Image (cartoon, grey):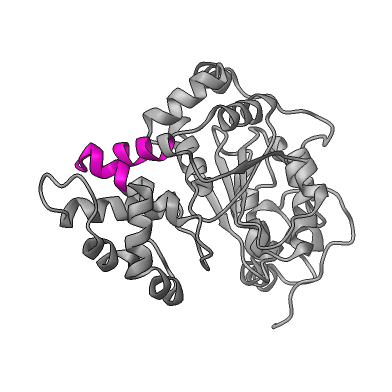
């Protein structure tokens, strides 16, 4: 038997067969019901997200520095239980925020990396056809009702369905990374999840979250994301940090770098971002470069040397044309202007 089993013609919860367990009652709830967090989760949220200032301090304690606007947006997303949509240039810390939130709330991080051609079977669920075929062969196609083939036991849960799994004891952080890389059609599938924290499976029913996940979507804005998706989220644009903020980030990430040299590193990067380059260096590149400078700079050096900058440009710039353009006279000029 090589064909897939036929889909169920009835949109109802099938009766569990012998030795099989149907979906738990919590997994298939009234779509109108609004799940509330358990007391322990509510207490954790109240303590760690008591105010935007508390959120900023908690994130800073884990090495993630935010300004007042981002702290407010994160606070409201947590309190209102709404997805958080972050746009910005690559390397400004959008993805990292989801990881830090998972660390902050001591919960699982579920990551879905988007790409062109991503569909439901890779992102949400698919049926375990080999197991279904084995069940048919074991009991006989005539004896096994079609509905018995479509139950939770035969369901393969991908990241989106894992994020609303009623069997989980607490809400995870769901990161939908670089949504702008996925096709526009995939956005339509996300609308139900982002708006109602549920996924409708035609053969099984509606699976609704018992603990609403903390959802973070990121976009590098390689294309515009549809307004219908953005309306379901709290939106925030993450820009490159200010000089003082980036200096503080480097201080926390590369404590071995001397203070004056640290400031010189950040000043050069911020001046470099004003150039017309194929890809501007992000904060991640600043941190990597600062670490490299801490290894190669002369002991006690307070300023960057042009030769050191030229030799290490590959940590800041990721395109050969950009490196060739900056290398030499322009690097020396930018050093002088950023001093």
Q: Quadrant of residue 80?
A: top right
Pick the residue in front: 219 or 9: 219
- The answer to if 239 sits in the magenta stretch is no
Pick the residue in front: 236 or 259: 259
| Residue 299 visible (yes or no) | yes
Seen at 44% across and 25% down, the residue is 58
| Residue 127 visible (yes or no) | no
Total number of numbered labels?
0
329 horizontally vs 156: left or right: left
Query: Image height check: is 38 above or below 285?
Result: above
Give the residue furthest to the bottom.
2
Q: Tell me where residue 2 appears, x and y as whole percent.
A: 69, 83
The magenta region covers 245-264
Seen at 37% across and 28% down, the residue is 61
Pick the residue in front: 69 or 207: 69
Is the magenta region chiefly helix, strand or loop?
Answer: helix
Q: Quadrant of residue 148?
A: bottom right
Location of the N terminus by quadrant is: bottom right
Q: Tell me where residue 93 appears, x and y as whole percent.
A: 49, 46
Query: Image height check: is 122 above or below 261?
Result: below
Seen at 64% across and 65% down, the residue is 128
Q: Tell me where residue 191 appears, x and y as whole percent.
A: 79, 48
Q: Tell me where residue 285 appears, x and y as whole percent.
A: 39, 55
Pick the residue in front: 19 or 176: 176
307 horizontally vs 179: left or right: left
Seen at 77% across and 28% down, the residue is 34
125 horizontally vs 199: left or right: left
């Amino acid at each position: 038997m090589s064909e897939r089993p036929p889909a169920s013609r009835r949109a109802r919860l099938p009766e569990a067969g012998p030795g099989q367990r149907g979906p738990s009652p919590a997994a298939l709830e009234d779509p109108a019901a609004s799940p509330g967090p358990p007391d322990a989760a509510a207490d954790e949220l109240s303590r760690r997200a008591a105010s935007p200032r508390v959120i900023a301090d908690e994130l800073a304690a884990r090495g993630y520095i935010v300004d007042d606007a981002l702290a407010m947006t994160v606070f409201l997303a947590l309190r209102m239980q709404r997805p958080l949509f972050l746009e910005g240039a690559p390397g400004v810390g959008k993805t990292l925020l989801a990881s830090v939130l998972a660390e902050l709330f001591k919960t699982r991080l579920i990551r879905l990396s988007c790409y062109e051609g991503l569909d439901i079977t890779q992102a949400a669920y698919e049926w375990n056809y080999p197991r279904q075929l084995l069940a048919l062969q074991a009991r006989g196609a005539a004896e096994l009702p079609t509905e018995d083939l479509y139950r939770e036991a035969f369901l393969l849960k991908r990241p989106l369905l894992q994020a609303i799994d009623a069997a989980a004891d607490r809400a995870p952080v769901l990161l939908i990374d670089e949504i702008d890389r996925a096709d526009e059609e995939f956005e339509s599938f996300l609308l139900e999840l982002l708006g109602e924290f549920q996924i409708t499976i035609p053969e099984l029913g509606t699976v609704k979250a018992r603990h609403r996940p903390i959802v973070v979507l990121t976009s590098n804005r390689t294309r515009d994301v549809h307004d219908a998706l953005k309306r379901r989220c709290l939106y925030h644009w993450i820009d490159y940090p200010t000089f003082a903020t980036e200096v503080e980030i480097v201080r926390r990430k590369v404590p071995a770098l001397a203070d004056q040299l640290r400031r010189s590193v950040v000043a050069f990067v911020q001046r470099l971002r004003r150039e017309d380059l194929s890809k501007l260096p992000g904060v991640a590149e600043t941190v990597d470069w600062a670490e490299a400078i801490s290894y190669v700079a002369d002991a006690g050096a307070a300023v960057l040397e042009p030769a050191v900058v030229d030799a290490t440009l590959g940590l800041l710039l990721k395109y050969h044309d950009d490196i060739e353009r900056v290398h030499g006279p322009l690097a020396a000029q930018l050093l002088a202007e950023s001093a």
